[in-house]
């Protein structure tokens, strides 16, 4: 393919036109089917998407009333999924897992309101695996087919088997495509938990441990909140819809949204309808014309809907595009009508909750009005400042655009002219923007939101991200903090993370905030060059380069040439996602790391410095 692309334009003829088989196309362009590849370090890496593609089919069996347990094992990079549903029809088994556009979900009555409707998922798993096995058991008959890289290796039929009906899929992701990878079981466990919240009565086992939910989205909220709710979560359910709602004390809006059991991390039409409906319903309940932002600030909520033939904005199914929940019924009206009746009824029956909620709305309104003048002035300042020339070197494609590259949009937040210059010179101008800080940002812990608009750095940053009114307006899928790997750089990381935690926590909750990892060392000889991100990698590189190894320690981003930087912000970019879990209470985290508890924090630093000294001593001995 590369040779064809490099062919002189004058030689462009029929022999330059290539037709790929579905298998060849999936292996050549896997990103079109599973998003990015990754090495397993991020929750949206391809190896987890492949697990979901298999599990989705088993969940669909449960949705159709067949099978109440799914067993998953992940061991030595081999994933196995066994359900106890109807089992794939035996004669069609091989085709169902290997032939594109083959399946039981193209109309008819076998499946309704499921996720996997395109006949692609499990085939992509097959073709991207070095080893793949599919086994189906139906009423004492069984068939097992095996594949390697999508090519059939064996086919065995059996009669008189004593196993329960169902389907078994096992696969090992192909390292020829993915390179070295490993599963983070924390991500897999969260995936399983999400399935249980959406499928009451369905039990999962993951490596022998059982997971089940008794209260659906109520369990999800209670198990994932990072702060105490102001009132007991409101839990409402009806045909094809379930919601759970409460408010916290922080800023921002936090949503968990699902479609047919699929976690839509980027929201979509159902989440937009929910945001609009909750503001309207609450305004009408109190007979007050509250600003929608005052109603929604600090909200923590979850919504799940079941949609006939859902349309997603990408194959990875993280954002819903369907405008109808079923033919002839608009998503907006469906959600609006449900909340308009059931949430209104709940608030009438629970006056204490209604009183607490109204008090929170009034507090939000009071603060918003107190800083409205500052906001207006800040907006005018942001417009007057030439962002493209002074602070922001923007890219051409943004997260809000409707095209294939929208999800690749990102912004690097960096400090100093040399660092921003290196990134700017080496970036992809289509999808990568750069925002330059002037020195260390302000420690915002304990301050009110007006500092966002009074502080020039914060004001211009939130204006560049476009997140003042809603996360749905975020212009970049990845917000990347890029600082030097030294004490000052770490401090800037902490200050910026505190800014997002304090005022825009939904940037983190929605999985948009990252830390860029840059190499600490360059080890090379005349033949090869290695970029090393740890002492362990450095020692291995020295061993491979031998006695002629030349070692360079990078002290800052500005020391890395733009030519080299391309290596670190392209396909080989290493990112650490900033994550929040139920064990990470925001206020306690900020108070400990950014508050005035100097002596307590000093003790923590000293204890960890001792650990670092021990590591250094070990390293010296190895060297």
Image (cartoon, helix red, strand yellow):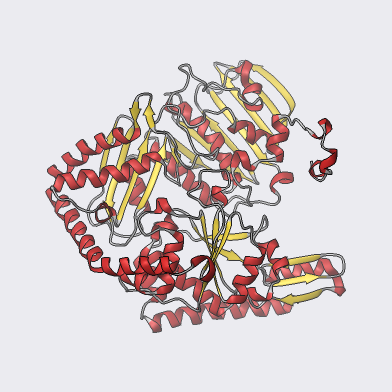
Q: Quadrant of the C terminus?
A: bottom right
Which residue corresponds to the image point at 70% horizontal and 38% vertical from the top-left?
27
Position of residue 284 measured from the top left corner of the image (x, y, whole percent): 17, 44
**Taking 79 as reference, is 244 left or right?**
left
Give the vertical position of 86 relative to 378 (above or below).
Answer: above
From the top left corner, tell me how far across and down residue 88 is, in percent: 57, 21
> Which of 266/432 is in front?
432
Residue at image point 53% right, 50% down: 43
Taking depth in this image into account, of 175 and 520 the one nearest to the observer is: 520
Would residue 111 appear left or right of 586 to someone viewing this image?
Answer: right
| Number of callouts | 0
Q: Report the side of 584 relative to 345 (left or right).
A: right
User: Residue 46, located in which quarter of the rendered image?
Assistant: top right
Instruction: Answer above or below: position of 128 versus 494.
Output: above
Query: In the image, 99: left or right of 610?
Result: right
Residue at (36, 47) in percent of width and height: 220
Q: Nearer the viewer, residue 146 or 92?
A: 92
Q: Is residue 109 visible?
A: yes
């Amino acid at each position: 393919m590369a040779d064809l692309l490099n062919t002189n334009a004058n030689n462009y003829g029929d022999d330059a036109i290539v037709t790929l088989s579905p298998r060849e196309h999936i292996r050549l362009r896997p990103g079109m089917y599973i998003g990015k590849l990754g090495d397993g370090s991020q929750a949206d890496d391809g190896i987890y998407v492949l697990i979901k593609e298999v599990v989705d089919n088993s969940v669909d069996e449960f949705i159709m009333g067949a099978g109440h347990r799914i067993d998953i094992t992940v061991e030595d990079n081999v994933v196995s999924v066994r359900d106890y549903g109807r089992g794939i029809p035996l004669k069609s088994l091989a085709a169902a897992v290997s032939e594109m556009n083959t399946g039981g979900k193209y109309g008819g009555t076998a499946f309704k309101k499921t996720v996997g409707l395109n006949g692609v998922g499990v085939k992509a798993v097959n073709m991207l695996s070095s080893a793949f096995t599919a086994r189906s058991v139906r009423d004492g008959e069984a068939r097992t087919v095996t594949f390697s890289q999508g090519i059939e290796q064996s086919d065995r039929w059996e009669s008189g088997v004593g196993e329960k009906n169902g389907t078994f899929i096992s696969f090992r992701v192909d390292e020829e495509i993915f390179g070295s990878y490993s599963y983070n079981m924390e991500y897999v466990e969260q995936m399983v938990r999400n399935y249980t919240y959406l499928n009451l009565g369905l039990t999962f086992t993951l490596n022998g441990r059982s997971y089940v939910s008794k209260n659906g989205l109520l369990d999800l909220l209670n198990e994932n909140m990072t702060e105490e709710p102001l009132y007991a979560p409101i839990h409402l359910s009806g045909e094809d819809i379930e919601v759970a709602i409460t408010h916290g004390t922080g800023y921002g809006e936090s949503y968990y949204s699902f479609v047919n059991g699929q976690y839509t991390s980027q929201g979509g039409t159902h989440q937009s309808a929910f945001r609009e409906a909750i503001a309207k319903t609450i305004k009408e309940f109190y007979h007050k014309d509250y600003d929608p932002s005052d109603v929604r600030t600090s909200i923590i909520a979850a919504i799940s809907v079941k949609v006939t033939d859902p349309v997603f904005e990408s194959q990875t199914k993280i954002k819903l595009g369907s405008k109808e929940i079923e033919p002839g019924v608009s998503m907006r009206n469906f959600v609006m009508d449900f909340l308009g009746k059931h949430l209104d009824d709940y608030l009438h029956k629970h006056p204490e909750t209604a009183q607490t909620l109204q008090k929170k709305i009034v507090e939000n309104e009071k603060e918003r009005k107190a800083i409205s003048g500052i906001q207006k002035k800040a907006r005018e300042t942001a417009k007057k400042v030439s962002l493209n020339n002074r602070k922001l070197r923007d890219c051409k494609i943004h997260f809000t655009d409707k095209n294939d590259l929208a999800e690749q949009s990102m912004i690097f937040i960096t400090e100093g002219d040399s660092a921003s210059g290196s990134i700017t010179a080496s970036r992809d101008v289509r999808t990568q923007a750069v925002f330059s800080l002037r020195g260390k940002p302000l420690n915002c812990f304990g301050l009110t939101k007006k500092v966002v608009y009074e502080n020039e750095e914060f004001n211009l940053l939130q204006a560049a991200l476009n997140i003042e009114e809603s996360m749905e307006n975020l212009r970049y899928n990845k917000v990347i903090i890029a600082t030097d790997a030294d004490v000052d750089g770490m401090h800037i990381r902490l200050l910026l993370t505190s800014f997002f935690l304090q005022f825009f926590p939904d940037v983190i909750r929605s999985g948009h905030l990252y830390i860029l990892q840059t190499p600490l060392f360059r080890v090379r000889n005349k033949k090869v060059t290695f970029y090393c991100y740890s002492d362990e990698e450095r020692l291995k590189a020295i061993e491979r380069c031998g006695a002629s190894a030349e070692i360079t320690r990078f002290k800052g981003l500005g020391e890395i040439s733009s030519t080299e930087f391309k290596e670190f912000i392209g396909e080989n970019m290493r990112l650490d996602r900033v994550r929040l879990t139920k064990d990470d209470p925001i206020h306690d985290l900020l108070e400990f790391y950014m508050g005035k508890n100097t002596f307590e924090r000093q003790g923590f630093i000293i204890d960890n410095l001792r650990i670092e000294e021990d590591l250094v001593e070990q390293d010296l001995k190895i060297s």
